[in-house]
Amino acid sequence: MLLSEAVKGLDIISVKGNLDIEITDIQYDSRKVSEGTLFVCVKGFVSDGHKYINSAIEKGAKAFLVEDDIYVEGCTFVRVKNTRKDMANVADNFYDHPSTKFDVIGVTGTNGKTSITTFLNEILTRAQKRVGLIGTIKIFDGVKEVTSSSTTPESVDLQHQFDNMLNNGCDYCAMEVSSHSLALNRVDETKFKLGIFTNLTPDHLDFHKDLEDYRKAKEKLFFMTTGANIINIDDEGGKKIYDSIKNLDIPCYTYGIDNKSDFMAKDIKSDSDGVSYRLITPTYEEVIFVPVPGMFTVYNTLAVIAACYNLGIDKSIYKEGLRITNGVSGRFETVPNDRGMSVIVDYAHTPDALENVLKTSKEFAKGRVISVFGCGGDRDSEKRPLMGEIGQKYSDICFLTSDNPRTEDPHAIIEDVLKGIDKNIDNYNVVVDRKEAIEKAISLGKEGDVVIITGKGHEDYQVIGTTKHHFDDKEVAREFLSSL
């Protein structure tokens, strides 16, 4: 593609060099530059891409999107105000607007994104459709699967994945849309067929200045949709978003349990085998069963059903798809054992998510609920005392331990968590080493007890300092159970 076509639609400050040159790739990481690449110089939180221009030239880059006034003989420099924002436009141009050629379903909210996109992938595949998937656990382009490095990829990588999905014959892409991706323009130029909002609870407040800023970032998604928006009306953040978007030209559907909505669940029954409810839609009622217990499963599947309804997927397909689902890796996932107790691993790492999984565990526990949880380092510290309070309140016994401490002292993180603990109640233990904490929790478990290990879910690593070490909660639990 000619550079002039790639930068079409940008508000260009200046051009130094020739726009009529061929570019064969777009990169924002100088290590990935090759001959003919357009290198986008992004001023990031850690590093400034402008510092790597010479390195990119040595590797064959001839064109640069920059914010600074720079020129090197023999190269073309296109200067704009914000390279991160304009990178999305350039990538969309370069890959010929892929999101306009198939249906992208965007899911945003604090909790539930991975479950919803996974359920949608299973159901749409069951409907004989080819489905791409972008999310926290993995990216699937219709043919091959890779592990995700972030919930939502950078704009260049995202548009590239869309292009791969189209080339592989995908009809849909079910996609998690993080608040970071919305705030940092990663999904700019993406045309979403449907937008789904799950819920809003305090998270990522190290990045967003407050909960309102966090909500507004997520709200952006619902101004980028072409088919319909689907909103959890039981959630306070959802109500605010609904009020903001309800007068848009595209339809807005609501789902919920407590408030009257377009898609509702009534007569809910939950036990260790799963959850069932009477579904009420705008045109029919149906009984739904999902082999994943908990109220969060009800909300997640209501969102999925509302999406299927809008996409014209027959109710028999989604009903059966939900009935036989295997659930999601690291989301309320059971570790089998022969000791008569339930050992469960879950990704819950926010106060709301922790409360949900502990309440669900209490609903079917015949004995005690024993929990293991911690908080990540280099992340918003305000939620740590809340996690401590919730963990203690809804557990018979709880173990406070390390999550991903990153560059923080694990002991200091736990001290923050302890601020929410009532020291007069003797049901908490501090075990900094996560492996030891998991083993001690399981060793206390008896028949009928539920041992729930939260915070890392599908992750198979622990970040200590700046280094990733192999660590898998499920693996640790399995190995210890087999040794008993």
Image (cartoon, rainbow, N blue to C red):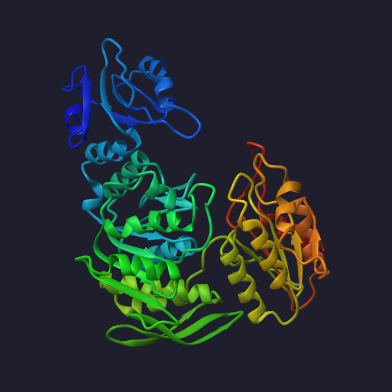
Residue shown at 35% from the left, 88% from the top: 285
Q: Quadrant of the C terminus?
A: bottom right
Q: Is residue 197 visible?
A: yes
The answer to which quarter of the image holds residue 12 is: top left
Give residue 465's position: percent from left, percent from top.
Answer: 67, 37
In the rendered image, the vertical position of residue 297 relative to residue 347, given as above or below: below
In the rendered image, the vertical position of residue 442 relative to residue 280, given as above or below: above
The answer to which quarter of the image holds residue 4 is: top left
Q: Nearer the viewer, residue 393 or 476?
A: 393
Q: Nearer the viewer, residue 49 or 141?
A: 49
Q: Quadrant of the N terminus?
A: top left
Q: Is residue 233 left or right of residue 47?
A: left
In the rendered image, the vertical position of residue 172 relative to residue 367, given as above or below: above
Give residue 190's position: percent from left, percent from top.
Answer: 28, 50
Q: Nearer the viewer, residue 22 or 361?
A: 361
Residue shown at 41% from the left, 62% from the top: 117
Q: Is residue 144 visible?
A: no
Give residue 6's position: percent from left, percent from top.
Answer: 21, 33
Residue shown at 80% from the left, 74% from the top: 446
The answer to which quarter of the image holds residue 385 is: bottom right
Q: Nearer the viewer, residue 479 or 360?
A: 360
Q: How many marks?
A: 0
Q: Is residue 483 left or right of residue 161?
A: right
